[in-house]
């Protein structure tokens, strides 16, 4: 009997929770500065909105280039070792953020220190998040991949939901050093907890080359990257959107996005094994595109909140739905590489969203980026509609 057959649902979840806590620490470290750093770069240091978006996107680009190797390291060395290194890098990003604050009167130096911190955080994210998923899958069995990925996503966006408003509050009370020191503390606690967990055996067997892994999973990752644009525009520019309309409550919209995301993960994650990942992704993209359209046409705060909530609902199951389909394309000994490559499309989507949306804002205003994001997500919906029949035949 497999592990998943001998354990109850509660026991499976307990095993999964013991490792997705590291994902929570990682993404809380990402969420804390998310609503603060663009304003710090733009208002305190005096740089343009494009530079502010680029600083945020540096983390995503760093994650993008390191994510495939993170999966490979997890395959070769085991996820426990890789998670601990990732947490240390997250902590180092907090240290560089503190140093950036100390040099706030010298904008070029402060910006450079922030950039280094964002790059380290991106490396830390790729190592921690990818390896935590693989750690969980190896603990409960590949038949529970959707469960592991779903709970990992709950940890991710619960952390983001808490992190955005908490980061704003800590910044108001203690400046950016407040959340930066918390990032360092979480890294230390997470490293200690990871050291206490038992590792899993590395799967032995022939590992196919990256090029073959890529050729098998790229279409799933491409659709994921397109769908990620909606999240990227909300997470990075919703504060500027509210400011352009002279409204208050941007952090609450971010929280509603995350609440919608978490609610769907908790209630409907079982739909993926029942209905198939491609079918679930198709419906998810349609709801996400609708939410972004509502934000674009909003004339009041409550409509923006509704749009953010629907976008969170729509985006919620995209990653696990397409991720389950992606890792089915490879053998267990190459699943870390598949996860890394697949996740890299998410990072690429987030990475290009910041600077491209920043350029659009300069030409057409903040509102336009939500119309563009809706169109991109609609394209993902169309591609997934073409993907679904092939996925059904394969299954």
Image: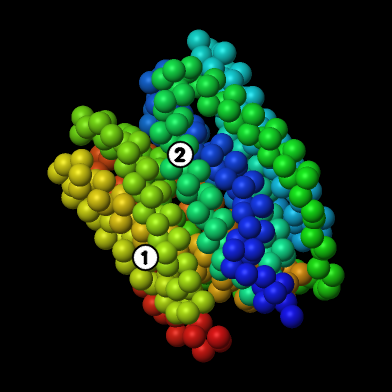
Q: Which mark is residue 162?
A: 2
Name the residue: 38% across, 31% down. 49
Within-10-Å neighbours for mark 2: few <14, some 14–19, many 20+:
some
> Can you tell which quarter of the image residue 345 is in?
bottom right
| Location of residue 115 in the rendering, given as x and y in whole percent from the top left corner | 57, 30
Work out whether residue 115 or residue 160 is closer to the camera in this orientation and state it.
Answer: 160
Whether pointer 1 and pointer 2 mark residues with C-beta atoms closer than 8 Å, the reply is: no
Which structural element holds mark 1?
helix
* Picture layout, residue 29 above or below residue 384: above
Which structural element holds mark 2?
helix
Work out whether residue 279 or residue 230 is closer to the camera in this orientation and state it.
Answer: 279
| Location of residue 269 in the rendering, given as x and y in whole percent from the top left corner | 47, 67
Residue at the extreme right of the image, as rendered: 204
Q: Which mark is residue 346?
A: none
Q: Is residue 265 left or right of residue 296?
A: right
| Location of residue 79 in the rendering, given as x and y in whole percent from the top left corner | 75, 54
Q: Which mark is residue 285?
A: 1
| Location of residue 373 in the rendering, given as x and y in whole percent from the top left corner | 34, 54
Work out whether residue 106 or residue 183 is closer to the camera in this orientation and state it.
Answer: 183
Name the residue: 43% across, 36% down. 164
């Amino acid at each position: 009997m497999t592990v998943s057959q001998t354990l109850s649902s509660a026991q499976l979840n307990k095993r999964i929770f013991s490792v997705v806590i590291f994902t929570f620490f990682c993404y809380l470290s990402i969420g804390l500065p998310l609503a603060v750093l663009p304003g710090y770069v733009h208002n305190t240091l005096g740089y343009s909105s494009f530079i502010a978006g680029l600083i945020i996107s540096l983390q995503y680009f760093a994650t993008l280039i390191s994510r495939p190797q993170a999966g490979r390291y997890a395959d070769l060395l085991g996820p426990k070792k890789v998670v601990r290194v990732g947490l240390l890098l997250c902590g180092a990003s907090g240290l560089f953020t503190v140093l950036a604050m100390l040099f706030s009167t010298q904008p070029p130096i402060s910006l450079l220190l922030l950039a280094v911190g964002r790059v380290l955080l991106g490396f830390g994210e790729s190592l921690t998040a990818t390896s935590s998923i693989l750690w969980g899958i190896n603990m409960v069995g590949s038949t529970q991949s959707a469960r592991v990925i779903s709970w990992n996503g709950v940890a991710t966006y619960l952390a983001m939901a808490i992190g955005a408003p908490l980061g704003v509050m800590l910044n108001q009370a203690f400046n950016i050093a407040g959340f930066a020191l918390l990032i360092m503390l979480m890294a230390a606690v997470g490293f200690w907890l990871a050291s206490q967990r038992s590792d899993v055996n590395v799967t032995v067997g022939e590992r196919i080359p990256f090029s073959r892994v890529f050729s098998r999973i790229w279409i799933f990752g491409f659709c994921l990257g397109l769908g990620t644009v909606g999240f990227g525009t909300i997470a990075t520019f919703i504060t500027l959107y509210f400011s352009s309309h002279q409204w208050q409550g941007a952090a609450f919209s971010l929280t509603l996005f995350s609440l919608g995301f978490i609610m769907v993960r908790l209630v409907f994650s079982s739909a993926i094994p029942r209905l198939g990942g491609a079918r679930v992704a198709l419906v998810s993209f349609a709801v996400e595109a609708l939410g972004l359209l509502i934000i674009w046409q909003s004339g009041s705060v409550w409509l923006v909140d509704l749009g953010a909530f629907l976008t969170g609902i729509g985006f919620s199951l995209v990653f696990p739905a397409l991720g389950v389909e992606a890792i089915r394309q490879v053998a267990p000994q190459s699943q870390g590489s598949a996860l890394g490559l697949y996740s890299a499309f998410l990072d690429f989507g987030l990475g290009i969203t910041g600077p491209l949306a920043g350029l659009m804002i300069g030409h057409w205003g903040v509102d336009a980026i939500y119309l563009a994001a809706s169109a991109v997500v609609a394209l993902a919906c169309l591609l997934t509609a073409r993907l679904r029949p092939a996925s059904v035949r394969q299954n």
